[in-house]
Image: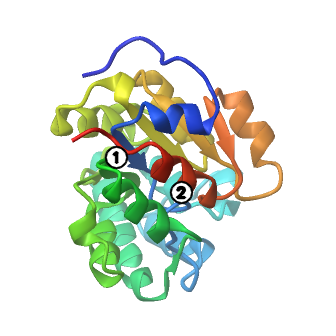
């Protein structure tokens, strides 16, 4: 269940009171488009849209972000959005073999499990692609829940709190015992709107400022910053 905004504190203070660790997928867990670039995927989605006789506006025509193209497709029709979402899912699945694991993510997962915590992945990426990646990298049996894209409705994706709320409900979790770790402002907004703490993963230059401005409860620059706090604060049996 969700509740009022969580108390602040640094990453260690947040981890100490966390029972449910929610991880964004593309960024903290892996770079899904490390081999098949996001711009290549966005171009293929644009081709699908133009093939239906629609010309994307300049911002959409130039963006390397597949999700932005998908969101635009939904402004045309639900039918086109469904086709674009299906194509995007296919491209994400194709990207899984060349996706690159996030630094220290396996250490974080191991430390979270050994300290008695529950782990969920909350992602705008396709649930099928997330599941395929986790199986490929030996993480499937270590992640308790996946809350990811299963619908052609972009309104359900972050920054909407829908997926975060879905994870909290399915885990029967208490919001004050949850934290979402994400590398984008959409993660921070989704977590805040769901009433849980957020840790901004500032893995690139410029991100500390943008994630802080978005309202992140704490900021880290490496997932390694979570490993020792997880080990130092095991949950009681």
- Compared to residue 47, the image places residue 122 above or below, namely above
Name the residue rendered at 49%, 39% in the picture. 15
Of residues 65 and 77, the one drawn nearer to the viewer in this rendering: 65
Q: Quadrant of residue 38?
A: bottom right
Number of the front mark, 2 or 1 = 2
| Distance Cα–Cα, label 2 vs label 1 | 45 Å
Q: Quadrant of residue 62?
A: bottom right
Residue identifier under label 2: 227
The N terminus: image quadrant: top left
Name the residue rendered at 77%, 43% in the picture. 208
Give the secondary structure at mark 1. Answer: loop
Q: Is residue 200 visible?
A: yes
Name the residue rendered at 55%, 68% in the picture. 104
Q: Earlier in the sequence, mark 2 or mark 1?
A: 1
Label ID, residue 63: none
Of residues 228 and 214, the one drawn nearer to the viewer in this rendering: 228
């Amino acid at each position: 269940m969700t509740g009022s905004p969580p108390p602040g504190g640094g990453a260690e203070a947040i981890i100490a009171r966390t029972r449910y660790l929610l991880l964004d997928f593309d960024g903290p867990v892996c770079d899904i488009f490390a081999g098949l670039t996001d711009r290549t995927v966005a171009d293929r989605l644009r081709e699908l849209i133009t093939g239906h006789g629609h010309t994307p506006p300049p911002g959409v025509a130039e963006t390397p972000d597949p999700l932005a193209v998908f969101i635009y497709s939904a402004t045309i029709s639900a039918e086109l959005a469904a086709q674009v979402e299906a194509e995007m899912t296919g491209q994400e699945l194709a990207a899984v073999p060349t996706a690159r694991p996030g630094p220290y993510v396996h250490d974080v997962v191991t430390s979270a499990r050994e300290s008695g915590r529950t782990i969920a992945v909350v992602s705008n990426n396709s649930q099928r692609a997330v599941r395929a990646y986790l199986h490929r990298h030996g993480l499937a049996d270590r992640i308790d829940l996946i809350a990811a894209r299963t619908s052609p409705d972009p309104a359900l994706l972050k920054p909407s709190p829908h997926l975060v709320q879905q994870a909290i409900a399915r885990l029967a979790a208490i919001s004050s015992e949850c934290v979402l770790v994400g590398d984008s402002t959409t993660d921070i907004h989704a977590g805040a709107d769901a009433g849980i703490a957020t840790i901004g993963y500032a893995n690139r230059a410029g991100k500390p400022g943008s994630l802080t401005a978005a309202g992140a409860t704490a900021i880290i620059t490496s997932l390694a910053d979570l490993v020792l706090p997880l080990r130092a604060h095991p949950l009681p049996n």
